[in-house]
Image (spheres, rainbow, N blue to C red):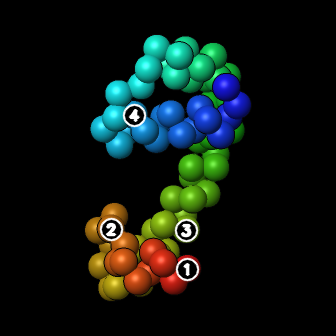
Amino acid sequence: MNLCRVGLAMLFDQAGGKMTHTMAEAVEKNQVTQPYVDHFIGEVKIEWDLWDSRDGEVDNHITFNNFYQV
């Protein structure tokens, strides 16, 4: 399972889905890359915070329009 699929499996799990045994094994095998993933998540979080503040309130939510217009 490549990193894209592992990322999707993790997203699926975090969104409330239930990972299959195969998905969980692939995620476990790819934990070596976690520092790189954390770095990229940090970069995305910086952008998210900018989008979040566009409505004048930093509440960890972005508006529908800001999500689709960036």
Q: Quadrant of the C terminus?
A: bottom right
Residue type at mark 2: give it: His
Neighbour tally class for label 2: few under 14, some 14-19, many 20 plus, Cα within 10 Å: some
Q: How far is disc 2 from disc 3 in space, using C-alphas?
A: 12 Å
Give whichever of discs 3 and 4 has the lower sequence position.
Answer: 4
Q: Secondary structure at mark 1?
A: loop
Residue type at mark 4: give it: Asp
Which residue is the site of mark 2? 61
Of discs 1 and 2, which sits in the foreground? 1
Q: How far is disc 1 from disc 2 in space, using C-alphas?
A: 14 Å
Residue type at mark 3: give it: Glu
Q: Position of residue 1 (x, y in %)?
A: 67, 25
Q: Nearer the viewer, residue 61 or 7?
A: 7
Give whichever of discs 4 and 1 has the lower sequence position.
Answer: 4
Which residue is the site of mark 1? 70
Quadrant hosting residue 67: bottom left
Which residue is the site of mark 4? 13
At 33% from the left edge and 68% from the top edge, which residue is drawn?
Answer: 61
Which residue is the site of mark 3? 47
User: CB atoms at circles 4 and 1 under 8 Å apart?
Assistant: no
Q: How far is disc 4 from disc 1 in space, using C-alphas?
A: 26 Å
User: CB atoms at circles 3 and 4 under 8 Å apart?
Assistant: no
Q: Position of residue 65 (x, y in %)?
A: 40, 83
